[in-house]
Image (cartoon, grey):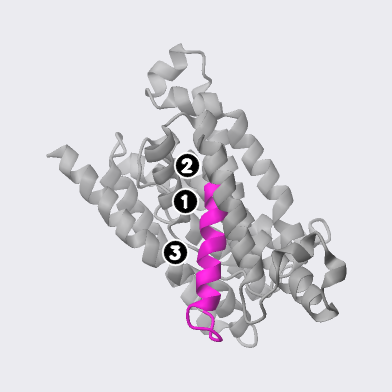
Amino acid sequence: MGYSISIALLFVVTWFAVSIGSVKIPFSILWHPSTADEASLNILWKIRMPRVILAGLVGAALAMAGAAFQGLLKNPLADPYTLGISSGASVGAVITLFFGISTSAFGLLTLPVFSMLGALMAMVIVLSFAKLVDRSMKMETLILTGIIMSSFLSAVISLMIALTGEELRQILNWLMGSVSMRGWVYVRMIWPFLFIGALLLWLNRKELNALLFGEERAHYLGVNVKRSKWMILIGGSILTGSAVAVSGTIGFVGLVVPHMTRLLFGSDHRHVLPLSFINGATLLIFCDLIARTIIAPTELPIGVITSFIGAPVFAFIFFKQRRKVR
């Protein structure tokens, strides 16, 4: 039932996202291209379709990463944004843009590779510092550590922006978070990393279920805890880094989608991971549709819409958690 509802919602939202805009395009053009004029076909295949697909891939990556981090840390407030991982990915990407780094080894993939390295480093630092402060790594410790990391990395980004010259506009546009005018090249850039990161998490779905009972219990159940944790961290960082590399910083998708998925369909990661993947794609396609139509012809950064949705949900989850502690 959960898969049927999620896939149906994704199809409906994609239908609207492809059709609605300054030029209305019937979705039937996909099956009957001969009925459309050349201008409509160009808008559909060169502008709207790559934008919708990219938004879906970014949303899917962030939501699946958030589901994995929440399961690993047993914390509903954990997601790439609140843990500072998105900020780490942003620093990696901004360094690439600032210095104009381009390697023959990676070519087009240089940006997402550096972004993923930044995400992984931020994740390791946050977890290490939180464990140093509080070995039990309570919710408050993790969130505060993530805020400290995000603040520091934001200062690093601000410094680079202050020192930059002609790259300023490119960096600022990227930091605001958007999938506008990215084109098929960005779709080709993200999908290999999306596949690798999602596969790593999917292969550790049973381990995530075992880790919900604690590391000691998971060990007795036959789980190689250390290896599984690193695989999950690496998989989540790959997803986060690749998403941030192509769209900039988009917050709260990894918080809202997994939490709602667990509420509606249960906490089994064999279903939470794929359903979060599908629902994350749906949410970001919907948010992008709102961002480009709500005050058309002006377009809002997609991160503004996700923050309007995510911040109240974050506050609600935090309030609910604090009430349980009392």
Q: Which picture quadrant has residue 105?
A: bottom right
Q: Position of residue 201 (x, y in %)?
A: 58, 36
Q: Residue at x 57, y 78 (%)?
A: 173
Q: Main secondary structure of the magenta part?
A: helix
The circle drawn on residue 254 is 1
Q: Amino acid at mark 3?
A: Thr
Of the residues under marks 3 and 1, which one precedes in the sequence?
A: 1
Looking at the rendering, the stretch of residues picked out in magenta corresponds to 278-299
The secondary element bearing badge 2 is classed as helix
Q: Please tell me which residue lies in front, 179 or 6.
A: 6
How crowded is the residue under tag 3: few (<14 C-alpha within 10 Å), some, or many (20+)? many
Label 3 element class = helix
**Quadrant that contains the C terminus:** top left
Amino acid identity at mark 2: Ala
Q: Where on the picture, by quarter, is residue 236?
A: top right
Residue 280 among magenta residues: yes
Q: Amino acid at mark 1?
A: Gly
Residue 326 shown left or right of residue 82 in the figure? left
How far apart, in angstroms, are the residues tagged by discs 3 and 1? 10 Å
Label 3 sits on residue? 306
User: Any mark on residue 231, and which?
Assistant: none
- Residue 314 higher or lower than 76, as above or below: below
Are the two marked residues, 2 and 1, in contact with CB atoms closer than 8 angstroms?
A: yes
Vertical arrangement, residue 12 with respect to residue 43, above or below: above
